[in-house]
Amino acid sequence: MALVAVTREVPETITYCQLTHIAREPIDLGRAREQHRTYERALAECGYSVTRLEEDPGFPDSVFIEDTTLVLDEVAVITRPGAESRRGEVETVADVIASWRKVVRMTTPATLDGGDVLRLGRTLYVGVSRRSNADGVAQLRELTRQFGYSVRAVEISDALHLKTAVTQLSPDHIVVNPRWVDASLFEGYTAIEVDPTEPFAANALMAGGRVILSTAFPRTADKLEGRGISVLGIDASELAKAEGGVTCCSVLFEV
Ligand code: CIR
């Protein structure tokens, strides 16, 4: 068994990215790429072999590769991203993922961003958001039913994606921002709440027994460490200006 992480270079056009909840500020491309390298090194430290796809300046948000595919053990679902400017990002990703998994595709009128899908065991929780619609939920259900997954739609408020509001930390724990999602929906998992001053700390990346978290969230990191979670902090400040967190910049799976 090997752990694989697929990432995509920060495009030089990142400054023209989609923004929904935050105001546009200048993004330093050099710094963003440097931080992205640090992120890749953190994944390597957690045991992943990292494949970085080339930049595509035609797609300002293409570094956020998580939104383009959901890679399960049995199949890779290629999404139809909710933002029109992002739809074409999936082609390169589909070609690359096809070397590891059978690929299936979502089609119009479905929209779904990978950032809206939280897999907990055999349940796929899907945030119905500005990006992911009811057809997206229905198609995901059809495409994964034969492999024994159940798909549950989740209401979220004020967050861009479901995984802005909740992510998995360990086989038993999740981290949540209770203002954005109802933690009681995720049965069987112990929910740890973010520090109230760090609303975006609910986006953590479980990787090989550790958790990668932005160093912008020291209070939540302390809280997680106190519960026995090993946190690997990285500076992710430049891509946070593009409304991206630590889950968005990779697709993780086992081969
Ligand atoms: C977007 O709005 O699509 C990007 N600027 C940020 C995407 C973040 N992706 C994610 O949380 N999965």
Image (cartoon, rainbow, N blue to C red):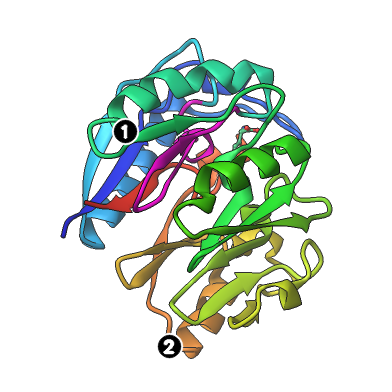
Residue 167 spot, x, y in % from top left: 56, 64
Mark closest to the chain's N terminus, 1 or 2: 1
Q: Residue furthest left?
A: 1
Residue located at (43% from left, 88% from top): 228
Tell me where residue 18 sits by quadrant.
top right
Mark 2 residue element? loop
Amino acid at dot 1: Ile
Q: On the rendering, which quadrant does ligand 1 occupy?
A: top right
Query: Which label is found at residue 119?
Result: none
**As drawn, 119 above or below 175:** above
Label 2 neighbour load within 10 Å: few <14, some 14-19, many 20+ = few
Q: Choose top left, top right, bottom left or bottom right for residue 2.
A: bottom left
Image x and y of residue 246, in percent:
48, 51
Per the image, the residue denoted by label 1 is 97
Q: Which residues are magenta?
A: 62-80
Residue drawn where x is 79% and y is 55% of the image: 156
Residue 190 x/y as whole percent: 60, 84
Query: Residue 232 is drawn in which quadrant?
Result: bottom left
Task: Give the residue at mark 2.
Answer: 228
Q: Amino acid at mark 2?
A: Gly
Residue at x 44% of width, y 32% of height: 104
Instruction: Answer few, some or many: residues within 10 Å of disc 1's Cα (few below 14, many 20 plus, some between 14 and 19).
Output: some
- Whether the magenta-drawn stretch holds residue 73 is answered as yes
Residue at the image point whose x is 73% and y is 36% from the top: 135
Foreground mark, 1 or 2, reads 1
* Residue 178 seen in render: yes
Residue 21 visible in rendering: no
State the quadrant of the N terminus.
bottom left
**Residue 178 part of the magenta segment:** no
Query: Is 53 placed above or below 147 here?
Result: above
